[in-house]
Image (cartoon, helix red, strand yellow):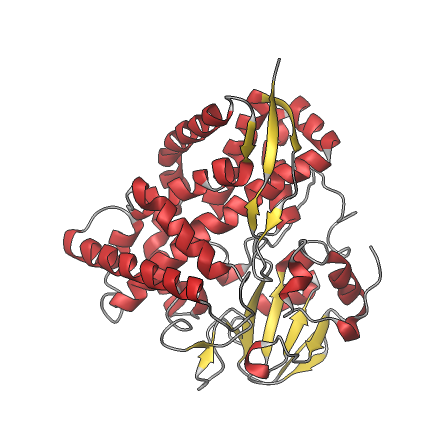
Amino acid sequence: MGAADVTGVDLTDLDVFVDGFPHDVFTDLRRRAPVWWHEPTTHTPDGVGFWVVSGAPEVLAAVADAATFSSERAPGAAGGGTLIQDLPHGFAAGVLLNMTDDPRHQEVRRVVTPSVAPRALAALEPELRRRAAALFDAVDVDGRCDFLTDVAVELPLQATATLLGVPQEDRHDLMAWSNATLDYEDRELGESSPAAEAAAAASADYGSRLVARRRAEGGTDMLSVLAAAELGDGQLSELELFMSYSLMIAAGSETTRNAIALGLEALVVHEDQWRRLQREPALVESATEEILRWTSPTLYNRRTATRDTELAGVPVAAGDKVTLWWASANRDERIFDDPFRFDVGRRPNPHLAFGYRSHFCLGANLARLEIRIVLEELRARYDGFELTGPVERFRTNKHAGVKHMPVVLHRRP
């Protein structure tokens, strides 16, 4: 990896991420300053600097202390959340599940956890396998496809729609709206655009009507379960239900699709590992974990210091923004042997693709299942695959977002 000048790094310049995660920059940060103060630049939202935590031990220390490093806000602050830019408290921060702290966070988690528990997923697995087979049957006509849109998007999106009780015919609208709000092709951090605003409005209208139906009619899907739940202070508000719908659409489909797509790219580039996986079917589970480590679909999450503290001996002031870079932690040389080697048999593999402790991803088991099903379909059907064009990425520093991935899949003779 090449050396990077940390004094000139601007992690809020989205052009730094257009070709993928800048691993050279973060390798240098881990070695020289695993807890580093990022001065504000012309790209930085709010005009406020923030801490960049790039090393795995330092990231773990922060996420293990949720009382000091809040997902919601500093005491009394008007904004907070898990993005670099402040989001208003009481609308996003403090309402979205991933932007709440305990005890509220755990209270809501307990309601929806049974929907994605192993028993529930075991019941869902045959349907997911049927849907995955249908997706591959469709692309097997000539083997050429956009693997992102034809496969990687579809399986997680169909699963999420099923879990939320969203009609399958509406799923592409949901994905289009989510893509428009997550992409920064025509804007910078902290800015909006006509396309993003229109998508947010359309999603809000659809989500509000869906929430109202779930409140009135009930059901067994996750949104209905949330709507009927009685928590310590009563039922969730309409805003909390709408935010839950929005979060589940994005988190349930967007991150897993990128892991699936970039996992295939890794198998194309590291053909020896694909051949190894073909020979050793027992490696599917460890390959799934390595794909999660390698792709790190969520690049960072932010916390806010609630008090004066230290992180790895570095003083952090109350109210400071602290960004935790999972994609960098998953390449930390102190934790992973030869971290820039893609190894489908890697064990142990203590990656942080799903976060850690109280905010460990609710959908982790579902994501693992979906990736495993895709790998098993690939093994059963194909001798190999190749990229037929460049991988097109979203312009963002938050997700390892893929727009398009043209490939040809070679059937077994």
Residue extending farthest right: 3
Quadrant position of residue 89: bottom left
Residue at coordinates 76% horizontally, 43% vertically from top-left? 341
Image x and y of residue 58, in percent: 68, 67
Image x and y of residue 398, in percent: 57, 61
Q: How many marks?
A: 0
Determine if residue 316 is in view. Answer: yes
Image x and y of residue 51, in percent: 65, 75
Q: Quadrant of the C terminus?
A: top right
Residue at coordinates 60% horizontally, 59% vertically from top-left? 299
Residue 244 against residue 408 in the figure, above or below:
below
Determine if residue 363 is in view. Answer: no
Q: Is residue 150 left or right of residue 243?
A: right
Image x and y of residue 238, in percent: 25, 66
Residue nearest the observer in this picture, 246 or 393: 393
Q: Quadrant of the N terminus?
A: bottom right
Residue at coordinates 51% horizontally, 39% vertically from top-left? 152
Residue extending farthest left: 216
Residue extending farthest top: 413
Residue nearest the observer in this picture, 66 or 39: 39
Residue at coordinates 49% horizontally, 77% vertically from top-left? 86
